[in-house]
Amino acid sequence: MKLAYFPGCKINFYLKDYDTSFKSLMEKLGVDLVQLPFNCCGYPARSTSFEVSVFSSIRNFALARKYDLDIITPCKCCFGQLKYASYQWHENKELKQKMDCLLADENLFWDGKTKIKHLLSFLYDDIGVLEIKKKINHKLPEKKIVTQYGCHALRPFTITGFDNPHAPQIFEELINITGFKTVEWSKSTECCGNPIYETNKNLSLKILNSKLNAALESGADHICTACTHCQIQYTDLSFQNECQKHHITPVLFTQILGAALGIKKEKLGEDRLPIFDLRVS
Amino acid sequence: MNFKNQHPVKTPFLVATGDDIVETDVLIIGGGVTGTGIARDLTLRGLNVILIEKSDLNAGASGGNHGLLHSGARYVCSDPEAAVECSTESEILKKNVGHCIEETGGLFVAVKGDKENYIADFPDMCKKYGIPSEKIDPKEAREMEPSLSDETIAVYKVNDASINPFKLSIENINDAVSRGACYLSHTRIEAFKIENKAIVYARVRNQISGKTHKIKAKTYVNATGAWAGSIAAMAGIHINMVFSKGSLLVTSKRITKRAINRLRKPTDGDILVPGGVVSILGTTSVRIKSPDNIYPTVKEVDYIISEGEKMIPELKTCRYIRAYAGVRPLVSMGKDNDRDVSRGFTLLDHEKDQVNNLITITGGKLSTYRLMAEKTSDIVCKKHQVSVECRTKMIPLPSTHSGEWSEPGVLVNDPFKPDTLEDPFLCECEMVPASAINTVIDSIKKNGGKPDLSSIALRTRIGKGPCQGAFCSMRILSHLYARGEIMDQTGINDLKYFLNERWKGEQSLLWGQALVQSSLKEMIHCGLFGLELVKK
Amino acid sequence: MFQITLYTSLILSTAGLLFQVYRFQKKGASGVPKLKLSLNLKLVLFNTIFQSKLFRASKTRWAVHFLVLSGFSYLVFFHALDELTAFNLFQYYQPTLDPFQFLRNFAGFLVLAGCIGFLFRRSFNTRIKPDNKLKYKGIFSIILILLVIGSGFMLETVKIISEPAFLEMVEDYSDLDEGTDLDHLKIYWEKNYHVVFKETLLITEDALEQGRRLNNDYCLDCHSKINSAFVSKAFATHLGKPANFLNHYRADNWLYPIHYLLSFLMLISLPFSRFFHMLLIPFASAQHKVTNKHFQKEAVFIHPATFAACTNCGICSEVCSVYPNFLITGNKQILPHSKIESARKMIFTGHLNPEALNQLQLGNDECTMCNNCTNICPSGIDLQGLWKTLPKTLHKMGYPDNYTFVKDKALQDWGNKELEKDRAAGTYGLTQNLTGRVYSFENCVQCTICTNVCPVVAYSGNDNDMTPQQIMNLLRLGKKQTAAETRMVWNCLTCYLCQEHCPSEIKVADIIIELRNISNQTAERLKIMTTADKANTL
Amino acid sequence: MKDKKYITCDITVIGAGFAGMVAAARASALGLKTVQTGNSSHLYFASGLFDFLGVYPLHSRTVLQDPLTGLSLLQKEMPGHPYSKTSLEAILKSFDFLTRFLQSAGLNYIKPEKGNRSVLTSAGTFKPTCMIPETISKSRLLKNDTNLLLVDFKGLKGFCARQIADILKKNYPNILTLSVEVPGKNGDLNPTHLATLFEDSSFLKELATQISPFLDKVELMGIPAVCGVNKSLEALTRLEKMTGLDIFEIPMMPPSIPGLRLKNAFEKKLAKNKVHFLSQAKIKPPRFNGSEFVLDVMNQNMETQIRSRGGILATGRFPGGGLHAQRGRIQETVFNLPVYQPDERSLWHHLDFFEKQGHLINTAGVETDSVFRPVDTHGAIIYENLYAIGTILAHNDWVRLKSGSGVSALSAFTAVNDFYKKSTTGH
């Protein structure tokens, strides 16, 4: 299987480990990732201009279309934005026309055929939980873990079609096959606070804190994310004290699954949990 | 909230207890725009005044109209005298009570099928009576008002404006009270004591406390509008009153910037007046027997919409919030069609009827309320041998904060940032915060009234938004209890009364989203609270 | 004469360098906490000598750079400084001997080819259509190189053809007098070394043979076959008639000072022209790049000298993540190569046109910190570090970001009637126009579910003003601008909980985001209005 | 080209209100492959109390002490009413199933007992109902002479302890009131946010210390129904332990927390039971190809096609969007089924909001056979495997009869059972 890898803007600078472990995971699962000169997904421009944000996404689609590839991204924000843009492109004729003109200026075109997959939905829908379960050769210790779904993939459901937006399940199912045990908590579908990190750090911190409190009440050891932004929020240096205070470590889903699939630890990034090295087979 | 223009409000000089006789110069009966206007006029001339009202301000036609300040153009063909009156009065009002008026401007619009000769005569008639009008190309008019029908064939621009009658009455009475007048709400006339061709005193009853007392005045002014006949009857005088019901519809949004009139002989469903963020469509003219308990019927609503949509097609599909009706009090001159009866006012000095100190003022229009008050006060002053000129022409009506909340979206005109945090909105639809409710409660109490849902609703926008009281009623009731304004179980009945009043205004136009909203209301108040099971 | 000019230009160049260092130091010390960044020696080495980063970024650019740099380095080292280098290294060294003669020509040829490559590439537009100003940027340096090399070749050419020079050399290095021998030599040199003689010489086989013998005796030690000076020889053989004219006026004598004066001019202009990037790139590359961790500690220091290493190549803009934003909004200051230019101007000259500063602030706000520009920058500049520190600097100068601007702006200014009037205008391109159409929010049943699920309302305390459903009500009441200015609109996490929960299925979050667009764009318009005033008063 | 997705299932439940949730619960419990569409947020409007029959006949305007007496009369007088189509046993069975299902989802309800319970509401009235959440159950301890403490929270709009006390003063003279300020929250206090606070142990402690000085002689305590979202009973018990009192919740106007608890419980459990939920999905007019329904779901970004053997229409009335009223006519929105309704709009509503007979429009709806399959005006079944359940059913003014949850649960239970029976017997 060949897919265009859409890393998103933040991953390279802020979260190299996610990039590394994602690539290793895909390699392990036999997926060829193609790197294209993608630009920003357009989500940050949502705040300033609707048109800019949609165009950014459509341009990425057009690039992928040029190579006849579907897009996969590890970032929920990018996933949501690309879905959103494709919806707007389909619905809004005037917008579509303008986008087509702009693309034509750059010798690109898009016919709406490119599909966008998020890491989780790809694993769940295209590969299948059972298939992955078969490949797992290193059971991980039974640590209690809560999931952070990521807003933009989950909602609005009518646009993203990711999973039941009120009671999502796929993340839990995918984690439970690794040996980690997911526990229920009330805030799995709530926002991590990262979108307003720059403008209102205080509120962003409060939101993070409330999540950590809830995670603590549920008895979790870890928070698992499958989104660049969420993980950045939890691992942010100025917030890290909060996680330590709550004795909760944020972990990347790709590292967990990677470890369970027996990927060498060097290939899972520099910043790993020590438990990955103590695999219980 | 920091309020500007706070007026010192004097405590009423009258503490009505038992059978005490209270003396005053003039007793005004009826708290509509005319009554409150007379109260202000007379206090400005230095007279002592008591105003009594059987329910609360603007309960009659003053509260049941378009809120249109006529330029006069509507009446140029049918009633030129009224037209000229309107024209001059509206200019005075724009100058003196500007804060109650939005100078929207108006259009007269004719659509395909309207009578050609009326359209042709209109500009000449306007010119003849000195009413400014300007012909506009229909195309241009549709650019000015995009919602106009594409079948528009002729358009004239006139100086119509919209006026908020509630604010007008509140401000008039507030000003009168600040000059020493006394306002007694929920006070009904029981009887007049007449001796020697004059009223000696009036026995009145407080509707809430049930107590009666006597008010002795030199002159009595009957400004009860549609009820003028029954008050006069108490003094043994017969006035041949005719009641004409007019129903109006409120849309959920403001459809036009300007007041839109149909360019034809005045008839039903031909005016659309913007009022803040909504538009008001009306009216009908139905002869009724009694001015009490009137409400718009489903048939009337449908008829108004079908007439209105010819001028503005959007009226067919837009959401309506409520419908209400007012009664035009007309003094019959023997004509069959109510539209042909003059909309001019009737001022009767009952000296000719052997009651020397009773004056009746009725009929007329909102636009000419000041003139009516002036003429009435002139007679009163003549009787009192007071030779002060009318001053309402010159002295602007001050704006007070307790009147402000009767306007839509007031709060958001002020910088609200620092205040909203600790000042929750009790009415979300119209964004009325707790502090505003408190201000209004204080103002009602100062005037000797009882703060309940209905009296607060009269002075604020609560219950007037899309939810029609579904949520705000309960929130404000709780607020009243929490403040100790209500201490017994009357709150429930108060709530039921309030909801029912709101209901009368919506029941005739419940379809689409309005029906959704009202179903929700019934689910809350009947389904959960079971209010229909509460017996009085 | 030569000595004086040499030393003058050396002094001038050194002074220029010192001045630049002083300037950088002064600008660098403006109160930013310094962060110890270790030296990245590997990058210095690779990027300076092999231009490794440029190689990755653009092969053609790398090729022309490499041609010029390698050729010029040779020329400087073995030609200009031959007295110090070549003569000492090689005992038999003579500029006119092979392989030196050939190498000099070859090096000169490389530089010439490189320069022509530069000019050629510039005349074609790259993806980022650079403004014409940028197109001619550094052209001075290229022309100067061309002149130096050209004058060198010309000098060699006129020396080749020069009869007087030939005669001088005969006098100096042989015992030949006027006579047949000399004529033989002349014939040989005319034939083989392309000297142009005034009189016409009769060429015979015998004379040539004689000349060859004489040449072997007297000249061959110092003069390799002229064929190796392939560029100059080509010039010389095709010179034709003007040759006599040049010989007559001793062109070889006066071209020499021109050549070295041009070279000295290069030396002097080193710290002030495009040549300077040769020194700055190693400096810029030497610094380790700022990382995420530095940002979080808020301890970031970018040495101003590194910005000067920018050559406006525009490669950064080609990979810029927000390049599409530029295509729609047209704000050039979104693109890194324009931003750094403005930032450089702002930092070194201290004043920048308010409008430009405003544009810079707005453009920089769009940056997503993807690090693409730093990764690719052939000069090794830490661009991302600059973008990250820029907002603070701009804020201090009175150009805050939109959020701060909106928060600090008094409502009266905000509710400016002008703005209220043309609120529909001034938005970039298309919108969903949810806020302009009543039916997108009028179905609100006031149930407050959106408010109840909103995390912003839940956790913000006093940090928030309106709730989502109050925003809907503000819109219904016709207060769009007021709604756009509420803190709720800016605090919104865009988590879509409200929209997913709304029983009337109102697009609450989309509406709030659209309001934020309006707020942003109003802020931008207000900023432009006020900066235009500022610019006028300046 | 949008993404196209095909789902095949046994049964599609259109609607995610109370009835839809019960139907999905029953279907998934029977092992049917179930797809559900709709907007579950309408459960925020649910009081969380399950009514059976509170008032009958309507003009009596008195609460039924025992719903069974009303039921037998209703079954006799209103043959069109959903209750008249079935037996008491079925109703009780459906309640029983519901209780067990919710129990497994972690939400405890008290089983029906003989006679209606009356639950104190925030308006100071008593609502007759049948099944109540355990957090409300202790309101039964309220006797006329009980020393009751009512607590309200400053900023929680629409709930005032003094109001309830003042209104009940006549019959319950010993009510004390207390208004508590929530630390750090000035101004508006939204029910869900307050409810989330109740799950925080430090908040509970703070609350208990604030209340404790006023507990002298108090026997029972009432608080607004905001005591926790997911672990409400746990929070209530903790507070009871801290104060040493029996506590009950008082339901208030929407957004209702007991409703939210229902929503969460249903959603989580149904997701675990693999019910495929399409949130806010719009359905194009479905086709019936003889053996199965083909529902094209407009999911904005992708087109989903559901093929299912059975369909359950649980779209509710006007607020839920199941019925839509134009100016003159009421329509059913998904299948355009015939709607029983008054002849003209002037008959829809009474002039009196509290008219004792109720408004005629509330009896409008879809008419069905005895297993809740919609029928046309002649009484013929329209689709073999289509069922209509919940408030969309005609002849049931559920608001006035206080019969909403009962009818919903019964119709959902009966309809799914019937479908199951048919599909297993191969009919």
Image: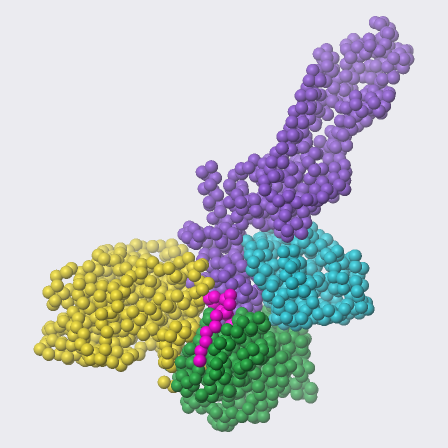
Going by the image, does B365 lie left or right of A201?
A: left
Q: Residue at x 63, y 48 (%)?
A: C299
Magenta stretch?
D176-191
Tell me if I can see residue D378 in this picture.
Answer: no
The location of residue C89, given as percent across then percent down, is: 84, 24
Residue B500, magenta (yes or no):
no
- Determine which quarter of the picture holds residue B484: bottom left
Determine the main secondary structure of the stretch shown in magenta.
loop
- Give the letter of the green chain: D
Residue that extends furthest to the left in the rendered view of this protein: B196
- Give the letter of the yellow chain: B
- Number of dots carrying numbers: 0
Residue D183, magenta (yes or no):
yes
Q: Residue at x 82, y 24 (%)?
A: C86
In the rendered image, the vertical position of residue D357 relative to residue D321, given as above or below: below
The location of residue B469, given as percent across then percent down, is: 41, 73
Going by the image, does A151 lie left or right of A28?
A: left
Q: Residue at x 69, y 60 (%)?
A: A74
In the rendered image, the vertical position of residue C361 relative to residue D24, given as above or below: above
- Give the letter of the cyan chain: A
The location of residue A174, given as percent across then percent down, is: 72, 68
- Determine which quarter of the picture holds residue A92: bottom right
Q: Residue at x 79, y 10 (%)?
A: C168
Q: Chain C, which colour? A: purple
In the rendered image, the vertical position of residue C444 relative to residue A55, given as above or below: below
Residue nearer the viewer, C526 or D158: D158
Quadrant location of the N terminus of chain C in the rendered image: top right
In the rendered image, the vertical position of residue B154 relative to residue C261, given as above or below: below
Colour option used: by chain
